[in-house]
Image: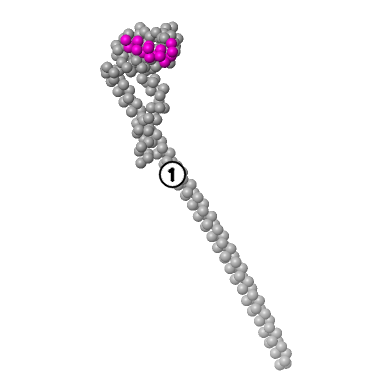
Amino acid sequence: MEPVDKKMVALISGIEADVRAEEEKTIKDAERRAEEKRRYAQKQADSLLKAAREQAEAQAASVTQRAIASVEREVKRRSLRLRDTVMQRIMDRAEKRLEAMIDDPAYRAVLVNWIAEAAVGLSADSARVNASTRERSLIDEQLLGEARDRAASQMGEAITLTLADAEPLESQGVVLTTADGRMAFNNQVKTRMSRKKREIQRLIYDAAFAGSQKE
């Protein structure tokens, strides 16, 4: 019976060894799969975190850009508003200075120039001249003669100018009308400034703003 017992012991020992080996292999396989899953999960987590960071950075950049653009628009809007205000104030002062010049003897030359300019613009053989009450008091035959001669030299033909018998104009400057009243040339101060608005604004801008921007 002893040899049989030894064989049984050896068989059992072999089976136990095989079982332990299988267990170790199973455990190692499980640990390996667990490690692979852990690495895969970590990689996924890292990928998600990276994507989240990139998305957050992109959103932050977008918000920052919108904020900067909004501030720039507001600054530009306020700058334009300030520029328009300054220009309007300067133009208002220019009108007041022109009005104050009416009492200056040199203003007769201004009227001669405005009347001649309007006569050339009207381009008629005769015209009636109207102006504000204060200006009409300065317009006499001598002044009309000077304006007529200046206009004729520019037009290359004679023109007759007479003081209109209509009601005086309300604002400063002159208006020339043909004898039949069908055509007129407005050379009042506000109209003149409106016609030359771009040029006036450019001069004001160059004087008041261009220098400060270079600094």
Q: Amino acid at mark 1?
A: Ile
- Rendered location of residue 79, percent (x, y): 38, 36
Compared with 56, 180 (above or below) is above
Q: Quadrant of the N terminus?
A: bottom right
Residue closest to the eye, 188 or 55: 188
Q: Give the residue at mark 1.
A: 68
Q: Is residue 12 shown left or right of residue 68?
A: right
Residue 17 vertical placement versus 61 (above, below): below
Residue 166 visible in the snapshot: no
Q: Is residue 77 visible?
A: yes
Q: Is residue 15 above or below residue 109?
A: below
Q: Position of residue 127 (x, y in %)?
A: 40, 9
Q: Position of residue 17 (x, y in %)?
A: 66, 81
Identify the residue at image location x=32%, y=25%.
94
Binning the other alpha carbons within 10 Å of mark 1 as few (below 14), some (14 to 19) or many (20 upward) gives few
- Secondary structure beneath dot 1 equals helix
- Identify the residue shown where x is 37% and y is 40%: 214
Segment tinted magenta in the rendering? 142-157
